[in-house]
Image (spheres, helix red, strand yellow):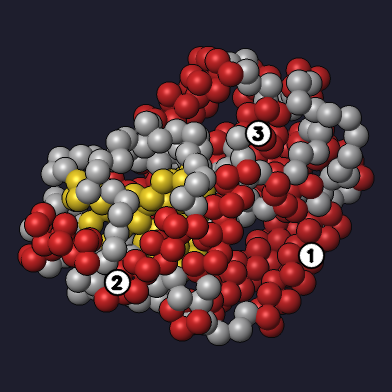
């Protein structure tokens, strides 16, 4: 049975819901560049990893370290970034697939991967690099950092204040969930968005008002120089490499590694799926629109029905649909599983360096949605990156 037909625009992992701009709300932005000054701003406490059971506090080490802006802030040179990317290839598949696990399992997996990341940085980097990354994590958690037991203990925040801030955080998250539900139903989110903005402002203001002057001083000392964590542009893993065991319909695309330097539009489909069929003309339009740009389209045909497992049927259907770009025959669902894909159709955008940047699940134009235009605009932005 086909999955939910409604499109779901996922610009952020559910697990990254709190990686937001207000990281700088608790501090004053501005001042000198901090790109290579890690040694002068190391926090004294040795912070622990976020407890997976502490669901109100986001686990942000992985998205932060994947961001090129953060890598620059940490002073990583090309060699260090290369070492980091080799390490990413050992963890990013598990990280990517964890997005579909239940909350407890997802957070437990992320905690394991965060521990491996810190071990890697300790082995290949400097203590200052690790310390600064932890500062950036605190900033990205914004008001929620006070809900971490280690931070609350260091700042000596009372249990009564923590309880009040916890209740407010739960209210914020409830509205975020409400907005997600309304979006999937194509209902207006205006009222909920206004409520959310007010709650977030209240969360930050009440966090500040909960701290004494001495506690605020200590807070500034542990988060270091302000850094706009909300401005990072790359917070997802490297795309899983293609698994080619049954060949292609049409000319092979090669590996994703071969396609570095180009923007890749990769979509999963099943040719008898009516929702997939409705998306195919949009993909053909993109192929024509970006024909003279560094853009490559790749289709992955993962079967659901028995007839969709026949390579000749797939090739014939692709020809009838006017598909001229490469289509990978995923007859054993190996790529589907590697990507932990959940819906026919789904389309992903991969940037020039091989990182997943955004995706769309379902029909691009379901009930008036403009996913085709949104994704095309996203491609244009990725083309501007070098």
According to the picture, the residue beneath numbered tag 2 turns out to be: 277
Q: Quadrant of the N terminus?
A: bottom left
Vertical placement of 33 versus 241: above or below? above
Q: Position of residue 28 (x, y in %)?
A: 88, 44
* Residue at (53, 73) in percent of width and height: 370
* Residue at (67, 35) in percent of width and height: 69
Quarter location, residue 201:
bottom right
Mark 2 or mark 1, which is nearer to you?
2
Vertical placement of 223 versus 167: above or below? above
Binning the other alpha carbons within 10 Å of mark 2 as few (below 14), some (14 to 19) or many (20 upward) gives some
User: Disc 2 to disc 1, how far (Cα)?
Assistant: 44 Å
According to the picture, the residue beneath numbered tag 1 turns out to be: 201
Q: Quadrant of the C terminus?
A: top right
Residue 260 at least partly seen: yes
Kind of element beneath mark 3: helix
Mark 3 or mark 2, which is nearer to you?
2
1 or 3: tag closer to the N-terminus: 3
Kind of element beneath mark 1: helix
Mark 1 or mark 3, which is nearer to you?
3
């Amino acid at each position: 049975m086909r999955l939910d037909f409604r499109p779901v625009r996922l610009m952020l992992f559910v697990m990254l819901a709190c990686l937001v701009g207000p990281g700088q709300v608790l501090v004053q932005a501005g001042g000198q560049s901090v790109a290579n000054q890690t040694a002068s701003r190391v926090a004294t406490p040795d912070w622990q990893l976020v407890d997976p059971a502490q669901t109100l506090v986001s686990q942000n080490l992985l998205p932060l370290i994947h961001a090129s802006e953060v890598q620059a802030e940490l002073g990583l040179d090309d060699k260090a970034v290369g070492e980091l990317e080799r390490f990413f290839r050992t963890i990013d598949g598990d990280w990517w697939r964890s997005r579909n696990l239940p909350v407890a399992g997802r957070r437990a997996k992320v905690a394991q991967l965060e521990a491996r990341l810190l071990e890697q940085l300790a082995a290949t980097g400097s203590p200052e690099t690790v310390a600064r990354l932890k500062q950036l994590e605190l900033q990205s958690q914004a008001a929620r950092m006070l809900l971490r037991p280690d931070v609350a203990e260091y700042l000596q925040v009372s249990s009564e204040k923590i309880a009040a801030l916890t209740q407010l955080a739960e209210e914020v998250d409830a509205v975020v969930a409400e907005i997600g539900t309304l979006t999937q139903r194509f209902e207006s989110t205006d009222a909920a968005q206004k409520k959310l903005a007010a709650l977030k402002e209240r969360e930050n203001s009440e966090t500040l008002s909960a701290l004494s002057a001495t506690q605020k001083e200590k807070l500034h000392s542990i988060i270091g120089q302000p850094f706009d964590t909300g401005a990072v542009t790359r917070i997802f893993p490297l795309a899983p490499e293609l698994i080619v065991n049954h060949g292609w319909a049409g000319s092979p695309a090669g590996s994703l590694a071969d396609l570095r330097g180009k923007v890749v539009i990769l979509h999963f489909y099943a040719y008898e799926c009516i929702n997939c069929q409705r998306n195919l003309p949009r993909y053909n339009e993109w192929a024509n629109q970006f024909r003279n740009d560094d853009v490559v389209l790749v289709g992955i045909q993962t079967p659901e029905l028995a007839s969709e497992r026949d390579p000749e049927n797939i090739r014939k259907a692709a020809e009838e649909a006017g598909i001229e770009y490469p289509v990978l025959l995923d007859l054993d669902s190996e790529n589907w599983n590697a990507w932990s894909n959940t819906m026919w159709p789904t389309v992903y955008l991969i940037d020039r360096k091989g990182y997943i940047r955004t995706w769309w699940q379902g029909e691009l134009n379901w009930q008036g949605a403009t996913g085709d235009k949104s994704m095309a605009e996203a491609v244009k932005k990725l083309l501007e990156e070098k």
